Structures are given as structure tokens and as C-alpha cells.
Amino acid sequence: MAYLDGDWLELATPSGNTIRVLKASHPRARRLRLTVSTKGARVTYPQGTHPSQVNAFLRHNADWLERKLGELNLVIEPLPPLRVGTSIEFPLRGETTVLDWAEGAYPRVVAQESGITLEIPRPNSRALPVARGLLASYFETQIRRDVSRWLAGYVPQLGLAPTALRIRPMKSLWGSLDTRDRINLDLALALAPPAALRYVLAHELCHLKVRNHSPRFWAHVESIFPDWREQRDWLRQNGALLKAELDRLIADVAD
């Protein structure tokens, strides 16, 4: 274990990987706690905890931590940040897409066969947040276009319809149905193959019929989207990377 700059620790795992762990004391913490998310690993501990206790706690949980991070595809180098003028590749609708930059009369996204171009007027001191906002709006438009087409088929089948559709970044879920029958979808689904988005939509629509995950619920899902298992498994395997990609693209406009 070695200290890094700032509030980070470096943990060497038995398999030879090196994991960076964010450390944070908390005034109301009663015990050491280790959490893993798409942003990485974090250890929280009560104020006054000796560093050796934190180190020992992390070493004791090194195998678990490595396994969890591996499941989230996070034992990798962090994604390069979005920088104005620098082209990057990212997934869009399940395909690798090139994001490029150009100067334009007004901010807009231009879609091409090879990828998308962000046109930003110059000079513009707010080019990066403007670009992030453009991408968020573009991704939402892609999702709404697909969903509106699929709803036209699903609603007659189910005999029920959601009261509204909300699309926003979600930390862990892909979708939800609230008590007002509004469907919420994760904005990161714009980066996934359309079939994965369709599965999440079908899943939430079936909750209009059954509010739990009983066999009756899955029977409804099967009836309107027979390939649900394949898409569920795809999201489990690739979902964390999609959420990390979305975070770097629209970080400062995400909820």
C-alpha cells in the first residue's frame, strides 16, 4: 500500500493488478466501508481512524474489490477526458463512432456516416459545457425517436401506456417506472445497441401490468420481447463501460 497525491490510496492485489482507491473520512461513519461504482473504488471510515487500519481493511478485501471492479470493467486505465478540438471514439447505438470538432456559426451536432461533428462558434470560453449539452440533447433525441416507434406497437399489445417518458443519466439503473406511471430511461442507453434499449423499454412497460419481478411479470416481458435474456446479459457485461463513457461525455450536465 502506498499513498498517492490527494485522497487516494494505491492497492496492489494478489493477481498483480494495482487499484486506486479514494479514501474519505466521514463524521457520522461508525465503521470502515468499501464501495464500488462506475467511478471506481471508495473507502469511507470514521474520523480518527489510524491509516494502518484502513490499509489492513483494504488488504483484507483486495480479492473482493478486484472481482467487483473486474465485473464493472474498471481494472483498466481511466477513459481519456473530453477535450475541445480533440477527436475521440465512443460507442453510439452499439457501434464505434468518431466524435470530431469544427467551427460553426452556431452550436450544433452534425451527424455523418463516419461519426458526429460538434460545431462550436469561436472564440467560445464555454465550448466544453456547450459541447456536453449538445451531446446530451442529441442522445436524448436518439432515444425518443426509437421509443416513440416501439411504443406504437407495444401499447396496443399491453392495453396500457405510460403517462410520460423521462430520459436522464441514472447512476445504477437502466430504467424505472414511478408511482405516476412515468417511465424513466438512462441516457446511456443511447450508446447501447437499439435492442438493449428496446429491452429496457419493454421491461418498464411490463411493470404497468405487474409491479414486481414475479414469474407473471417475466411472462409479460417474454410475450412482447422474446430476446430479453440476451439483452439483459449484454447490459450486465457492458453496462458499466457505457455509463463511464456517458459520464466523460456529459459529466457536467448529468443529474
Image (spheres, rainbow, N blue to C red):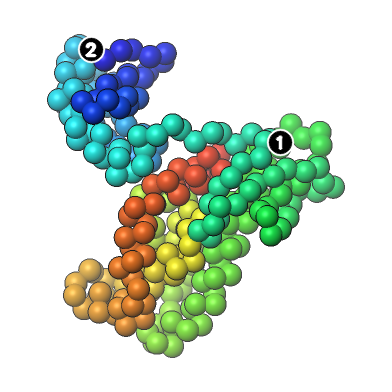
Q: Secondary structure at mark 1?
A: loop
Q: Earlier in the sequence, mark 1 or mark 2?
A: 2
Measured as percent of width and height from the top left, residue 162 is found at 43, 74
Which amino acid type is shown beneath numbered disc 2?
Pro
What residue is shown at x 36% (from left), y 42% (from top)? 73
Give the farthest residue toward the right. Answer: 105
Residue 165 seen in the current view: yes
Q: Quadrant of residue 125?
A: top right
113 left or right of 9 in image: right
Q: CA distance from mark 1 to mark 2?
A: 42 Å
235 left or right of 189 in image: left
Which disc number belongs to residue 190?
Answer: none
Which disc number belongs to residue 51?
Answer: 2
What residue is shown at x 58% (from left), y 63% (from top)? 142
User: Up-down: is 168 above or below 208?
Assistant: above
Q: Secondary structure at mark 2?
A: helix
What residue is shown at x 26% (from left), y 15% (from top)? 1
User: Up-down: is 31 above or below 248?
Assistant: above
Q: Which residue is mark 1?
A: 85
Measured as percent of width and height from the top left, residue 234 is found at 36, 59
